[in-house]
Protein backbone atom coordinates (compact mmCIF):
# COMPACT_ATOMS: atom_id res chain seq x y z
CA UNK A 1 0.00 0.00 0.00
CA UNK A 2 1.41 3.37 -1.01
CA UNK A 3 1.00 6.34 1.26
CA UNK A 4 1.37 10.02 0.56
CA UNK A 5 3.90 11.84 2.72
CA UNK A 6 3.79 15.54 2.03
CA UNK A 7 3.98 15.93 -1.75
CA UNK A 8 5.85 12.64 -2.25
CA UNK A 9 4.28 9.25 -2.62
CA UNK A 10 6.20 6.86 -0.37
CA UNK A 11 6.37 3.08 -0.81
CA UNK A 12 7.71 2.77 2.73
CA UNK A 13 5.83 4.04 5.73
CA UNK A 14 7.10 7.42 7.02
CA UNK A 15 7.35 5.79 10.44
CA UNK A 16 9.99 3.36 9.10
CA UNK A 17 12.10 5.95 7.26
CA UNK A 18 13.92 7.36 10.30
CA UNK A 19 14.78 3.84 11.53
CA UNK A 20 15.98 2.80 8.09
CA UNK A 21 18.22 5.83 7.61
CA UNK A 22 19.73 5.43 11.08
CA UNK A 23 20.58 1.79 10.35
CA UNK A 24 22.12 2.74 7.02
CA UNK A 25 24.15 5.49 8.66
CA UNK A 26 25.39 3.05 11.29
CA UNK A 27 26.41 0.48 8.66
CA UNK A 28 28.21 3.09 6.55
CA UNK A 29 30.03 4.41 9.63
CA UNK A 30 31.15 0.93 10.63
CA UNK A 31 32.32 0.17 7.08
CA UNK A 32 34.38 3.37 7.02
CA UNK A 33 35.98 2.56 10.38
CA UNK A 34 36.73 -0.98 9.20
CA UNK A 35 38.28 0.33 5.95
CA UNK A 36 40.49 2.80 7.80
CA UNK A 37 41.60 0.18 10.32
CA UNK A 38 42.44 -2.30 7.57
CA UNK A 39 45.27 -0.57 5.86
CA UNK A 40 45.40 3.18 6.02
CA UNK A 41 46.60 3.30 9.60
CA UNK A 42 49.15 0.52 9.19
CA UNK A 43 52.29 2.00 7.73
CA UNK A 44 55.94 1.32 8.29
CA UNK A 45 56.35 4.82 9.68
CA UNK A 46 54.58 3.64 12.84
CA UNK A 47 57.71 1.63 13.64
CA UNK A 48 59.98 4.69 13.54
CA UNK A 49 61.31 6.08 16.82
CA UNK A 50 63.23 9.27 17.49
CA UNK A 51 66.94 8.65 17.96
CA UNK A 52 67.25 5.72 15.52
CA UNK A 53 70.33 5.46 13.32
CA UNK A 54 70.22 5.29 9.51
CA UNK A 55 70.98 1.56 9.64
CA UNK A 56 68.07 0.88 12.00
CA UNK A 57 65.69 2.90 9.80
CA UNK A 58 66.86 1.06 6.68
CA UNK A 59 66.21 -2.28 8.40
CA UNK A 60 62.58 -1.30 9.09
CA UNK A 61 61.77 -0.58 5.44
CA UNK A 62 63.80 -3.38 3.90
CA UNK A 63 64.93 -1.10 1.06
CA UNK A 64 67.72 1.42 0.71
CA UNK A 65 67.05 5.06 1.46
CA UNK A 66 67.70 7.71 -1.20
CA UNK A 67 69.78 10.70 -0.18
CA UNK A 68 67.79 13.90 -0.84
CA UNK A 69 69.52 16.91 0.72
CA UNK A 70 71.89 18.14 3.37
CA UNK A 71 71.17 21.08 5.63
CA UNK A 72 73.51 22.86 8.03
CA UNK A 73 73.66 20.00 10.49
CA UNK A 74 71.13 17.55 9.08
CA UNK A 75 70.69 15.01 6.29
CA UNK A 76 67.39 14.12 4.61
CA UNK A 77 66.68 10.71 3.10
CA UNK A 78 63.60 9.44 1.24
CA UNK A 79 61.96 6.02 1.10
CA UNK A 80 59.47 5.22 -1.68
CA UNK A 81 56.93 2.40 -1.58
CA UNK A 82 53.39 1.62 -2.79
CA UNK A 83 50.85 3.11 -0.38
CA UNK A 84 49.00 0.55 1.77
CA UNK A 85 45.46 1.52 0.73
CA UNK A 86 43.02 -1.39 0.60
CA UNK A 87 41.10 -1.68 -2.65
CA UNK A 88 43.53 0.44 -4.69
CA UNK A 89 45.92 -1.08 -7.21
CA UNK A 90 49.36 -0.44 -5.59
CA UNK A 91 51.24 1.23 -8.48
CA UNK A 92 48.57 3.94 -8.71
CA UNK A 93 49.34 5.49 -5.32
CA UNK A 94 52.88 5.89 -4.04
CA UNK A 95 53.96 6.77 -0.52
CA UNK A 96 57.09 8.82 0.05
CA UNK A 97 58.56 9.08 3.50
CA UNK A 98 61.17 11.75 4.19
CA UNK A 99 63.47 11.10 7.15
CA UNK A 100 65.61 13.80 8.77
CA UNK A 101 68.76 12.81 10.64
CA UNK A 102 70.90 15.10 12.81
CA UNK A 103 74.24 13.86 14.10
CA UNK A 104 73.36 10.39 12.79
CA UNK A 105 70.08 10.17 14.74
CA UNK A 106 66.48 10.37 13.49
CA UNK A 107 64.91 13.69 14.50
CA UNK A 108 61.79 13.80 12.31
CA UNK A 109 59.87 12.36 9.38
CA UNK A 110 57.06 13.30 6.99
CA UNK A 111 54.70 11.15 4.88
CA UNK A 112 53.54 12.15 1.41
CA UNK A 113 51.19 10.28 -0.89
CA UNK A 114 51.27 10.75 -4.63
CA UNK A 115 48.60 9.51 -7.02
CA UNK A 116 49.73 8.55 -10.52
CA UNK A 117 48.17 10.62 -13.27
CA UNK A 118 46.03 8.71 -15.74
CA UNK A 119 46.84 8.71 -19.43
CA UNK A 120 43.36 9.87 -20.48
Image (cartoon, rainbow, N blue to C red):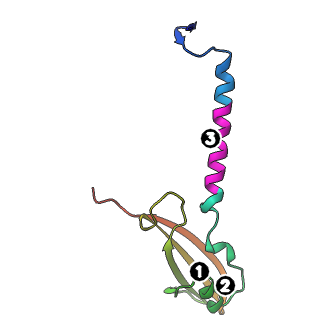
Q: Nearer the viewer, residue 43 or 109?
A: 43
Task: Locate residue 67, reporting x and y percent.
Answer: 49, 87
* Label 3 to label 1: alpha-carbon separation: 36 Å
Task: Locate residue 72, reporting x and y percent.
Answer: 58, 89
Q: Nearer the viewer, residue 45 or 90?
A: 90
Type of secondary structure dominating the magenta stretch: helix
Residue at point 69%, 87% (across, down)? 52
Residue at point 53%, 85% (across, down)? 63
- The tag on residue 99 is 1
Q: Residue furthest left?
A: 120
Callout 3: SS = helix
* Label 2 to label 3: alpha-carbon separation: 40 Å
Quadrant of the frame with the N terminus:
top right
Query: Height in image: 43 above or below 117?
Result: below
- The tag on residue 35 is none
Q: Give the extent of the magenta segment.
A: 23-36
Q: Nearer the viewer, mark 2 or mark 3?
A: 3
Task: Locate residue 19, reporting x and y percent.
Answer: 69, 25
Task: Evaluate if marks 2 and 3 touch, with contact meaning CB atoms under 8 Å apart.
Answer: no
Residue at point 63%, 59% (across, down)? 38
Query: Height in image: 66 above or below 39?
Result: below
Task: Evaluate if marks 2 and 1 touch, with contact meaning CB atoms under 8 Å apart.
Answer: yes
Residue tagged by mark 3? Answer: 28
Query: Dot 3 surroundings within 10 Å: few (below 14), some, or many (20 or more)?
Result: few
Callout 1: SS = strand
- Does the magenta portion include 110? no
Classify residue 36 by image quadrant.
Answer: bottom right
Residue tagged by mark 2? Answer: 106
Task: Locate residue 58, reporting x and y percent.
Answer: 59, 87
Amino acid sequence: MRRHWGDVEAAVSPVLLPRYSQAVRRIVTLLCIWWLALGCARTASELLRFGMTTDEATAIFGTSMSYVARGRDSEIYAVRAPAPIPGVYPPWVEERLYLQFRQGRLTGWKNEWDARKFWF
